Amino acid sequence: MDVSIIIVNYNTGKLILNLLASIRKYVSDITYEIIVVDNNSSENISELLIPYQNEVRCILLPENVGFGRANNKALEYATGRYIFFLNPDTLLLNNAVKILSDFMDNNPEVGVCGGNLYDEKMCPIHSFMPILPSPLWDLNTLLGEQLFRLRYGKNVQHNFTKHPIQVGYITGADMMVRREVLDQVGAFDPDFFMYFEETELTYRIVKAGWKVYAVPDSKIIHLEGQSFETSDRRQQMVSKSKKIYYQKTSTMFAYYVAKVLFTMAALIRMGVFALTGNQQKRAYWAIIYKNI
């Protein structure tokens, strides 16, 4: 098997049906399997997947164990040389799976790769970051994203070039990893429920000597936010996971430096949006500030 496509579901059955239709439409000239893990959804995912019962293995979990643990459960059944972690709120725009698999075949030093992500209107969106999380992240936010712009040009979160570029990490929405790499460094850390689990895994992969690349020919729509609500709960989870990430990869001093920088950035944005009358963005940053 070339690729195991793993999709974690939590009440996103209708989105998954659209994703599966896009996989069926575009993926060819490659052997693949699809594994859907259901995190104890209220919907009947098995019934929804009946049209794909010959193409999809469905694993039903008795409780919501979070993103990383659900993916780890699927890994117990995956047989592919490459593991493609794919969000339920994504849609393939081309033969993205084969493009990424071929890139890995041709570049044995690469442990992780992913494609370019777009929103519903085909506008480029967050697909990766040039470096792994560090206080530089939050300093960049404090400086209005200009620090990374000076260093990386337009290619801060999206690959606008026509060739693959080395990056810090690929977003977990479309992350392809060599199975041998996961066997070497381990899978997702179960201490994370959601958020930062893919960056912590990437940290271990890079530390082991593997490279991470963004491949622009692989194109995928990401309906960002439709698989999880924007709320206090979400921001609380982000903040908690960020702290766990620093505990595992850096120092608490670095974490507190990052926290101070990000707090300042949030306060500045709240003030700017209040002055300019953009209450929606001010409210968004108020939720973030409240839960830092």
Image (cartoon, grey):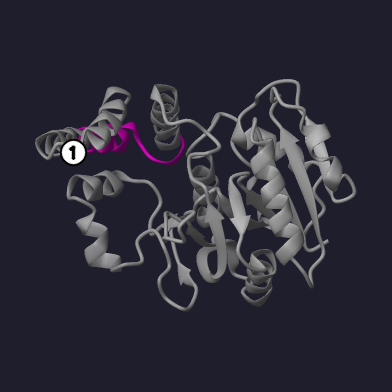
The image shows residue 55 at horizontal and vertical percentages of 85, 51
Q: Considering only vertical position in the picture, is 210 above or below 199?
A: below
Query: Height in image: 237 above or below 257?
Result: above
Q: Is residue 268 magenta?
A: no
Bounds of the magenta segment: 248-263
Give the quadrant of the N terminus.
Answer: bottom right
Horizontal relation, residue 193 to residue 64: left or right: left
What residue do we see at 90% from left, 49% from top?
54
Whether 163 is drawn above or below 277: the answer is below
Residue 247, image x, y percentages: 42, 33
Residue matched to label 1 = 269
User: x%, y% of residue 117?
Assistant: 50, 58
| Residue nearest the viewer, comparing 96 with 15 | 15
Say how many tags the image has: 1
Residue that protrudes farthest toward the right in the picture: 54
In the image: residue 162, left or right of residue 95: left
Query: In the rendered image, which quarter contains the C terminus?
Result: top left
